[in-house]
Image: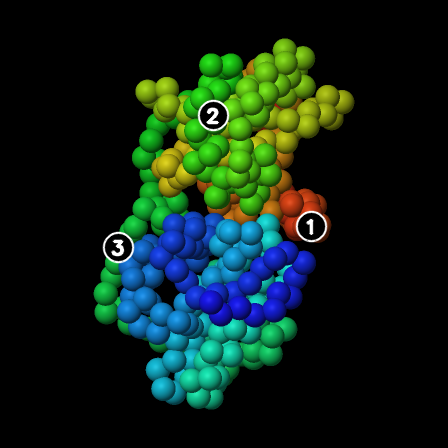
Amino acid sequence: MDRIKPLCPEDVFVRPYAPRDRDQVMELWHVCGLTVPQNDPAKDIERKLECQADLFLVAESRGAVVGSAMAGYEGHRGWIYYLGVAPALRRRGIGRMLVAECEARLARLGCPKVNLMVRAANASVCPFYERLGYVRDDVECLGKRLIVDGEPPMCRAQSPSAPKRAVSIRPFRLKDAQALFDAAVESCGHVYPWLPWCRPGYTMDEAVGWLRHCRQSWATGSEFNFAIVDSAGALLGGCGLNRLDGPHRTANLGYWVRSSALGMGVATQAVGKLVSFAFGNTDLRRLEIVASVANIASCRVAEKSGAIREGIARSRLVVHGVSHDAAIYSFVKPIRAAA
């Protein structure tokens, strides 16, 4: 197995893609916002394995895929694409490792120059490439699709479609333990990078402990945590109000959705119902959503829910020991004019 010397504290190494990596790689691409409706990630993987498969690389840490990159060489120029690093592990040299290995493999093939394309919506990544020596070429990029893959399930969350699954919210119950445990185990791949509680190895005891906490905090009015359920009562995720500041009548609003319910409008609907609860049943006047700027999915939910983006707070969050700039969104209770 090919390895290069790690450039970060974790036990990270870069190696060629293996079939066992498929689900983790597609989840990584989804979390990093690399998928678009016209590209089916599963088909892209199949195509790459049939053409220069040794230029399809992953970064592995402690048995988990934490980064990926594809490279290609057609005899004139080399290309790098599908470069992504798990959001919680960025700024630790993993992206640099992947690019360096792509460049080394292309150079061994006699490739004289490497190019890459960055979507306009992802322009914030350009400084990263510039630090690695990439410069903006004075060219126009034109493209024509020969095969349209359609809209695969992994990309549905990015489509401006109407909600596909009606949901409601209700307080968590102790009898939700099994359902909560199952949802957490299923979802740690995309939830854990942002919510450390949903970790690999999550236990039933932790689920029960959380539900007891929910019941106690609800009784004291310190937090209001809800299960997100569908019309059949299946648990699809959770949302809640925490960090309540009584004197200022503010609270933090959070949410998560299990993997099997992504892309169905679940979080957006739940946020709307939670806002209605807060402004209709408490004296809260302001609700805040604080999301890492790298947590694209969470930011999209905030925006689709009608929250107002107020700006970026630098180093506002620390996730897995790494500081993140955060987008600040708010809902403010309308003030009725006096009669």
Q: Residues within 10 Å of mark 2 (few under 14, many from 20)?
A: many
Left or right, 158 with reference to 96:
left
Tell me if 48 is positioned left or right of 235 in this view.
left
Seen in the picture, residue 145 relative to 12 is either above or below; the reply is: below
Q: Residue 58: x, y in percent?
A: 47, 62
Task: Give the residue drawn at x 43%, y 23%.
Answer: 179
Position in image of residue 306 (x %, y %): 50, 37
- The mark closer to the camera, 1 or 2, is 2
Q: Is 184 drawn above or below residue 129 in the view shown? A: above
* Residue hosting label 3: 150
What amino acid does circle 2 point to?
Leu
Task: Please determine whether, in this image, residue 311 is positioned above or below residue 201.
Answer: below
- The residue identified by callout 1 is 323
Q: CA distance from mark 1 to mark 2?
A: 29 Å
Residue at image location 64% in from the left, 26% down from the top: 242
Of badges 3 and 1, nearer the viewer stands 1
Q: Where is residue 277 drawn, in percent x and y?
A: 53, 20
| The one of 69 and 324 positioned closer to us in this rendering | 69
Seen from the viewer's position, the closer of residues 339 and 235 is 235
First in sequence, mark 3 or 2: give its number. Answer: 3
Specify whether residue 46 is in view. Answer: yes
Q: Type of residue at label 3? A: Gly
Bin the neighbour count of mark 3 within 10 Å (Cα to Cα): few under 14, some 14-19, many 20 and up.
few
Give amino acid for label 1.
Ser
